[in-house]
């Protein structure tokens, strides 16, 4: 793992790069973090994904809020005051518009690396990052060829920047895994997303896991080992069929 800095329109974004030990060039993968920020469990995504043959970039999407200590997921899940701080200090600045501006810089970084294979990148995201992954697929359709979203929330809301409104622009193959217990992505929202993607002719899979919102990460109280491993199988299959087939 290497820590780098990427200059964006609004400042400098600390980011983490993970590479295989040999075999360059590798397909590029952009990972959008979850709402619990950068911490060991989030870094493990890059550590586990890279050895499968990918150059993985994991930016800290909360950089606009300044330095911060790692968050305790158990406290965030159980303490309303902790969630209020998270929303007001971090989420308020990590808007889709701001993150898409940042994503332009992230994509330029990937394009500038000689060890990154040409021909489009993949992206995956978790929680708020799942929303960002789908938004990026619609915002940068000529750059992103595969996008995955795991326990993403607000994927088809009434907001003017809801990802489902970008469906007609999406060219990437999508994999979307929802949680069966997730107030931020209820059944009616799943149906709205399903209909939007289907009408737009997007190549996608939308599945609901028997798990709770946040199931992927081992440091959360809702971690589900079986569902987390299923996430890995689906993610690697998506990238194998898209990034490595190019």
Image (cartoon, rainbow, N blue to C red):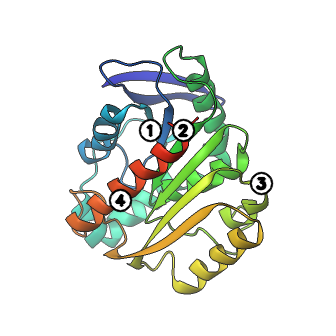
Question: Callout 4 environment at 10 Å: few (<14), some (14 to 19), or many (20+)?
Answer: some
Residue 17 placement (x, y as % from top left): 39, 27
Q: How far apart are marks 1 and 3 (CA)?
A: 26 Å
Residue bearing mark 3: 169
**Residue 60: assigned label:** 1
Q: Is residue 34 visible?
A: no
Asked if the residue under mark 3 is in contact with the one under mark 4, i.e. CB atoms within 8 Å, the reply is no
First in sequence: mark 4 or mark 2?
4
User: Which of the two discs, 3 and 2, sits closer to the camera?
Assistant: 2
Q: Is mark 1 on a helix, strand or loop?
A: loop
Asked which secondary structure carries label 2, the reply is: loop
Name the mark nearer the viewer: 4 or 2: 2
Q: Is residue 106 left or right of residue 143?
A: left
Give above or below for 100 relative to 157. above
The residue pinned by badge 2 equals 245
Quadrant assignment, res 112: top right
The residue tagged with tag 4: helix, strand or loop? helix
Q: In the rendered structure, are the residues bearing label 1 and label 4 in contact, judged by CB atoms less than 8 Å apart? A: no
Q: Quadrant of residue 118?
A: top right
**Image point 61% across, 31% down: which residue?**
107
* C-alpha separation, residue under disc 4 versus residue under disc 3: 26 Å
């Amino acid at each position: 793992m290497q820590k780098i800095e990427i200059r964006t329109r609004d400042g400098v974004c600390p980011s983490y790069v993970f590479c295989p030990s040999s075999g360059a060039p590798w397909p590029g993968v952009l990972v959008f973090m979850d709402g619990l920020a950068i911490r060991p469990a989030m870094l493990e995504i890059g550590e586990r994904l890279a050895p499968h043959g990918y150059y993985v970039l994991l930016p800290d999407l909360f950089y606009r809020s300044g330095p911060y200590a790692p968050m305790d997921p158990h406290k965030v899940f159980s303490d309303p005051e902790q969630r209020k701080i998270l929303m007001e200090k971090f989420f308020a600045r990590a808007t889709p518009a701001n993150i898409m501006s940042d994503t332009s810089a992230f994509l330029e970084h990937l394009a500038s690396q000689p060890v990154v294979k040409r021909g489009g990148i993949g992206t995956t995201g978790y929680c708020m990052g799942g929303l960002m992954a789908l938004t990026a697929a619609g915002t940068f359709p000529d750059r992103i060829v595969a996008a995955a979203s795991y326990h993403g929330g607000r994927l088809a809301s009434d907001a003017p920047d809801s990802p489902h409104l970008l469906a007609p622009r999406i060219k990437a193959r999508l994999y979307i895994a929802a949680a069966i217990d997730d107030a931020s992505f209820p059944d009616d929202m799943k149906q709205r997303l399903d209909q939007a993607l289907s009408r737009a002719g997007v190549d996608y899979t939308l599945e609901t896991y028997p798990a709770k919102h946040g199931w992927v990460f081992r440091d959360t109280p809702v971690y589900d080992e079986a569902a987390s491993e299923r996430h890995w199988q689906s993610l690697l299959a998506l990238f194998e069929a898209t990034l490595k087939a190019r």
